[in-house]
Amino acid sequence: MRMLHALTVMVFFSAVSNAAGALTFEEAEKAMLAANPQAVSAALDLEVARLRVTAARTGFYPSFSASASYDRSGAQGRPAGDSYGYGFSGSQPLFSPSVPVALRSAKASLRASEAAYDRAASALRYQLKSAFADILNARETIKLSEETLKRRNENLELIRLKYQAGRENKAALLETEAALKTAQWQHERYRKNLRLLERKLNRLLARPAQSPAPELALAQPPEPPEDFLIFNQRLENHYSLRSARAALDSAGASVAGATGARLPNASASGSYRWGGSDWPVSLNSWSLGANLSLPLFSGGRLSSDLSAAKTALRSSEEDLKNAADEVYLNAEDAFLSWRETRAYMDVAKSSLDAAEARGWLVRKQYLAGQASYFEWRNVEEQLISEQNQYLAASRGLITSHAAFTQALGE
């Protein structure tokens, strides 16, 4: 009974002080995003998208190249001869609709990659916070289990003395022994579950699976506000909406590309070349020119491509509308669950306080011979159940707030 009130404070639920060696959630998050394979893969995909934007932007700039050649040839009865050539050439696009379209498409892909990275990071943050809550809950459960084992041992000694004195029946003694063995089995199960959770945390942090988990520090979730509408602005930056907008921009770029395929393309080019058979005596040549091309007939391919691109654009517009509805509904559902879980915390706390008071009273009554063994046993079981429910409610509050944060796209 002595630790029951302390357990209600819930070290894992309240803000934990910065104890030496304690790993905070913020520190773990940085380590996870830097080393977790999923986060690293998403970051590399994002870097690839940035490089493709840079590559697409170079289509506006002129290009230059250098070339050189050397040949030695001859015929039977004649001396061998040398020939060589070297020069420079360059080109500059003057009007090419495909170049800005390629840049626009690359930028849309970059925004999609940014949204994909934020999606992966948000999912990992939720997993990490859930792992923190699970481990802290498991550790507190083990502490509670140790206290339960202690009480079960004390109860068994008490019932054995009463049985030996002829004041209690054998069924009560056997039942108390079974309760102690059950508590021992549950304690081992709690220890196994804790180890599995610690391995899960190590994997999230890209640490060796056999490494012991450090002490953890997790801040208390804030109180939920009354109105969900205050989060509407934050939902506008949700990764699902940004991904849908990027897909819409990409579809718009496809329409522009299909339209531009009907337009002429123009470019300018120039070259200067030296060539001959005896170094350094050589002949030189140069050229400057412009090129213009206009598609005249493609068998309906251009019009079909344009129709398909416009249809895909309308599909992307509908996908964006659907994504906006889903984001709002999922976020509101998570918000309502968060408020419900917070309200249940008060219920669990009140029930635990009542069970503690009832357990203390009935135990005193049983020791004084004013209550039966079965009444005392039932109150003990109810107390243990309320303790576990309060631990579960505390964990549920943390995970529900984490789920709401994820629903906001953060």
Image (cartoon, rainbow, N blue to C red):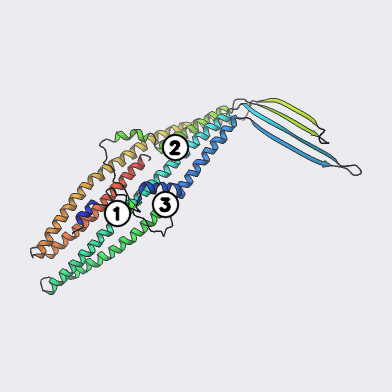
Label 1 belongs to which residue? 137
Residue 294: where, in percent of width, then height?
64, 25
Q: Is residue 328 among the parts visible in the rendering? A: yes
Task: Please determine whether, in this image, residue 25 is positioned above or below residue 197.
Answer: above
Q: Nearer the viewer, mark 3 or mark 2?
A: 3
**Mark 2 and mark 1: Cα distance apart in space:** 36 Å
Q: Nearer the viewer, mark 2 or mark 1?
A: 1
Task: Please determine whether, in this image, residue 287 is positioned above or below residue 186.
Answer: above
At 88% from the left and 43% from the top, the residue drawn is 75
Label 3 belongs to which residue? 205
Which element carries disc 2, helix, strand or loop?
helix
Circle on res. 370: none
Q: Earlier in the sequence, mark 3 or mark 2?
A: 3
> Which residue reaches farthest right?
77
Mark 1 belongs to which amino acid? Answer: Asn
At 39% from the left and 57% from the top, the residue drawn is 199
Label 2 belongs to which residue? 243
At 73% from the left and 27% from the top, the residue drawn is 287
Asked where in the image residue 59 lies, by quadrant, the reply is: top right
Is 113 displayed left or right of 21 in the figure?
A: right
Mark 2 belongs to which amino acid? Answer: Ser
Is 83 displayed left or right of 335 in the figure?
A: right
**Mark 3 and mark 1: Cα distance apart in space:** 19 Å
Asked where in the image residue 232 lies, by quadrant, the reply is: top left
Mark 3 belongs to which amino acid? Answer: Leu
Q: Nearer the viewer, residue 285 or 268?
A: 285
Specify the quadrant that holds the N terminus: bottom left
